[in-house]
Image (spheres, grey):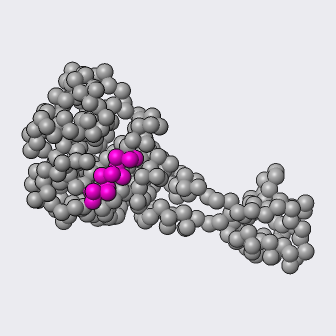
Amino acid sequence: MLLRYHEDIWDDGGMVIFEHLTKRYGSLKAVDDLSFTVEPGVTGFLGPNGAGKTTTLRIATDLIRPDTGKVSFDNEPYSKIRKPATHVGLALEPVVFHPGRTAFDHLMMLAPYAGVGKKRCQEVISLVGLADAANKRVGKFSLGMRGRLNLAAALLGDPEILLLDEPVNGLDPEGIRWMRDLLRSLAGEGRTILISSHLLSEVAQTVDRVVIIAHGKLVYEGSLAELESASTPIVSVQASDPAAVRGLAAQYGWTVDVQPDQILIEGPTAAQVGEAAFSAGIALEGLSTHTTDLESIFLTLTEGQGEMR
């Protein structure tokens, strides 16, 4: 899909290591002893607005100096990478363009920094779906179109690593699907991609792994499958005698949430609840297991997040 201009200077994929990052603004810690690793594939960097995602990405690319810690790209800090645009592609917020410049001219302005020319600019502008708007002034672009152009700029140097801040911001459902397919295709070529988002639902079908932070701290790092399996099962019970079910749950130390039409029990499986009720002589009218969706897990992990970004 993409012509690789720099195959002679890098192998497929890359590793990004964030080590003990801390950044304070006065008495408030935007990033708090944060460590994680990004490997080849697509990693979702998740957390509510204000969790510290953008600050972390700016630290990684030397736009902000951390109080402690470091970030390395294949064992090199960003500032020491020779021709960084050929190694690390950046699409960070806020997106800033000259409103009177065309999309193509914007890329041509950046081309020398990536060591490429007109042909490459044409290639990436087509890749991100802006071929028909290449000669339109960016000041007339929608938020989604600006995001596509920002991604085109990140891809100019054919980098092995991509850091993307809220890449689906402003995209409609069709655009989100397009972005998902593009990122999966790029990852299939062996690239390492980190995409930040405040909504797990937007990236759940795209990423291989997730890193979740809240209040600048790491709360989860691993695969989506591991995240789902780590959730506690919830059993829904319908019974004519809710008080008896509550008593049974208390006996076994299960957490109970009594609702108008059901009793939710956290901890045991449906089979365990059924067996316990049978042994106690409690008649149940209905018994089923609730599947906790990823978004609910995400909200639970990040509950109470503040607004510092």
Is residue 303 among the parts visible in the rendering? no
Q: Would you say residue 183 sits in the magenta stretch? A: yes
**Along the line of sight, the residue nearer the viewer: 25 or 219:** 219
- Horizontal placement of 133 versus 114: left or right? right
Residue 200: x and y, percent? 48, 50
Q: Would you say residue 218 sits in the magenta stretch? A: no
- Horizontal placement of 119 versus 21: left or right? left
Point out the residue furthest to the bottom here: 279
Residue at the spot 18% in from the left edge and 48% down from the top edge: 3
Residue at the spot 13% in from the left edge and 50% down from the top edge: 5
Point out the residue furthest to the front here: 1
Q: Quadrant of the C terminus?
A: top left
- Looking at the picture, does residue 168 appear above or below residue 140? below
Is residue 175 among the parts visible in the rendering? yes
The magenta stretch is 180-192
Name the main secondary structure of what is drawn in magenta: helix
**Along the line of sight, the residue nearer the viewer: 212 or 115:** 115
- Looking at the picture, does residue 236 appear above or below residue 202? below
Res. 244 image quadrant: bottom right
Residue at the spot 22% in from the left edge and 23% down from the top edge: 135
**Along the line of sight, the residue nearer the viewer: 12 or 166:** 12
Residue at the spot 37% in from the left edge and 57% down from the top edge: 43
Residue 190: x and y, percent? 27, 59
Residue 105: x and y, percent? 16, 28
- Horizontal placement of 20 versus 277: left or right? left
